Amino acid sequence: MDSTLTAPCNASILYPEDGGNMHRFTAETACAVLDVLGPPYSNPEGRHCTYFLEFPLDKFSSEEDDVLRGQVERECHAWLQERDDNPEDRNVVGALYGGPKVED
């Protein structure tokens, strides 16, 4: 999904079938984001949380590259570099879910 959500709005649910779940939140105004994960990240259990640095596609590409030709394609893509650390403004709070049983 690539969209702008405006409050009030329904919850958005991401169910990746494979390969993980890559997402980014960009605030256009002051806001808070509640990102509920189930099951939670757990390095020992193979559920890693990885953060990336984003670079414009043009930074490491030349006009001769066959990566993406069109201007729109170039603006909609970026090179990602895995971070060695977590963002300074990252705030994660864990809590046990005490609600009703969730079924697919």
Image (tube, rainbow, N blue to C red):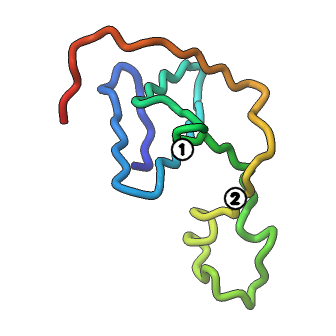
Camera-nearest residue between 26 and 22: 22
Picture residue at 52% right of the left edge, 39% below the top:
45
Camera-nearest residue between 16 and 29: 16
Spatial distance from mark 2 to mark 1, Cα to Cα?
Answer: 21 Å
- Which dot marks residue 46? 1
Screen quadrant of the C terminus? top left
Most extreme residue toward the left, as rendered? Answer: 103
Name the mark nearer the viewer: 2 or 1.
1
Residue indicated by mark 2: 80
Q: Where is residue 34 in the image (x, y as percent from the top left)?
A: 48, 21
Picture residue at 33% right of the left edge, 27% below the top:
11
Label 1 packing within 10 angstroms: few (<14), some (14-19), many (20+) = few
Determine whether 15 is above or below 92 in the image: below
Q: Where is residue 54 in the image (x, y as percent from the top left)?
A: 72, 53
Mark 2, secondary structure of its residue = strand
Q: Which amino acid does label 2 sit on?
A: Leu
